[in-house]
Image (cartoon, rainbow, N blue to C red):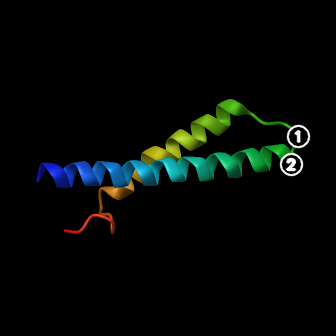
């Protein structure tokens, strides 16, 4: 059981990091077109996306078999 928990946290963490990176790239891209990157907004949106990713992962991860 302990190993399964470790695998879940690793998988959820990887997903959250990927989601945060995607959000940051999208936010920076939109801001760059508008000629003004608000780094606080980029960080805030990325952090929120990461938290939501982890919360969504609670419902289940295909990488971690039941």
Q: Secondary structure at mark 2?
A: helix
Q: Is residue 59 left or right of residue 39?
A: left
- Identify the residue position indicated by label 2 in the image: 33
Marks 1 and 2 in Cβ contact (< 8 Å)? yes
Q: Residue at x 74, y 44 (%)?
A: 28
Camera-nearest residue between 10 and 49: 10
Q: Residue at x 30, y 61 (%)?
A: 59
Q: CA distance from mark 1 to mark 2?
A: 5 Å
Query: Where residue 21 sits in the image (x, y, percent)?
Result: 59, 48
Seen as rendered, the residue at the extreme front is 3
Which mark identifies residue 35?
Answer: 1
Quarter of the image with the N terminus is: bottom left
Query: Where residue 43 sits in the image (x, y, percent)?
Result: 61, 35
Query: Where residue 29 sits in the image (x, y, percent)?
Result: 77, 49
Q: Secondary structure at mark 1?
A: loop
Q: Residue at x 69, y 52 (%)?
A: 26
Q: Is residue 37 above or below residue 59?
A: above
Quarter of the image with the C terminus is: bottom left
Which mark identifies residue 2?
Answer: none
Could you classify mark 2 by the number of other residues whose Cα lies within 10 Å: few (under 14), some (14-19), or many (20 or more)? few
Q: Residue at x 39, y 48 (%)?
A: 13
């Amino acid at each position: 059981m302990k190993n399964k928990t470790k695998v879940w946290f690793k998988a959820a963490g990887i997903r959250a990091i990927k989601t945060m990176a995607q959000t940051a790239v999208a936010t920076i891209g939109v801001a760059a077109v508008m000629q003004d990157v608000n780094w606080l907004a980029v960080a805030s949106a990325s952090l929120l996306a990461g938290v939501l990713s982890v919360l969504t992962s609670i419902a289940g991860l295909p990488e971690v078999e039941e």
